[in-house]
Image: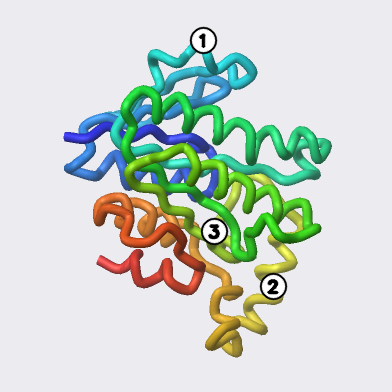
Amino acid sequence: MKKAILLGATGLVGGHLLELLQEAEDYGQVQVLSRRPIVLPEGKASVQVCDFDHLERHARQIQGDDLFICIGTTIRKAGSKAAFRRVDLEIPLEVASIAKQNGCRGAVLVSSVGATIDTRNFYLQTKGLVEFGLAQLGFERFTAVRPSLLLGDRDESRLGEDFGKLAMKVLGPVLRGKLARYKGIAARDVAKAMLAIARMGHPKPVYESEELASWAKP
């Protein structure tokens, strides 16, 4: 029975992944890393409240077989580019480094369509940098999934996503071929794909959005 470490369980993809891990017979424990206490449904998951500014204090507790990184924010919500970078780049790398040192063998990251270090777009460059940094840590298995617009109900409203969802209803049917990766994807399908990829031993280092739907099928 494996132990999963989940970073970002309160997010759209992370919430679905937590449910799937709770139901997964091959995972006996799920350790949720959170900045604050959260109430979880009864099951195998437990919360490790962390001071993300001093993760070294929690190093002994961050242990498991597979690390799932779903943490993410927006520049608007974070308040600045520096704060956004802290959440989407620095914290994932610090958590992953500790987990790797403690024997964690695999990691799966929720990145973004278009992620690359070779761009002036701050958001996409940050996503590219976290992918690159995690790949350099030396996990036996590492995969980044790059979903397009996430479909699903959030607890918070994101104006850009709301507009994107409306546009997707019109444009979705014509996004084919190379444009298929920009079609919206259900957050639950992304979570299903992450779990399936971890179970299959991470066949590829990167999966684009149009590839994730096939992994989400039973």
- Secondary element at image label 3: loop
Q: Nearer the viewer, residue 122 or 52?
A: 122
- Examine the rendered structure and indicate whether residue 176 appears above or below residue 129: below
Give how far across and how far down residue 160 sits, in percent: 75, 60
Of the image marks 1 and 3, the number of the one nearer the N terminus: 1
Label 2, secondary structure: give it.
helix
Determine the image quadrant of residue 59.
top left
* 208 on left or right of 106: right
Does the residue at mark 1 contact the one at mark 2 (Cβ under 8 Å)? no
Quote the CA–CA distance across marks 1 and 3.
35 Å
Residue type, label 2: Leu
Does residue 59 lie above or below 41 as drawn? Answer: above
Given residues 161 and 105, the one toward you in this image is: 105
Question: The N terminus appears in which quarter of the rendering?
Answer: top left
Q: Which residue is mark 1?
A: 57
Residue 144 picture location, percent across and down: 48, 54
- Name above or below for residue 52 compared with residue 133: above
Q: On residue 166, which mark appears?
A: 2
Q: Position of residue 124 (x, y in %)?
A: 69, 56
The disc placed on residue 152 is: 3
Look at label 1 and name its amino acid: Arg
Q: Amino acid at mark 3?
A: Gly
Which mark's residue is nearer the viewer, 1 or 3? 1
Residue contact at pointers 3 and 2, CB within 8 angstroms: no
Q: Residue at x 65, y 83 (%)?
A: 171
- Say if residue 43 shows up in the picture: no
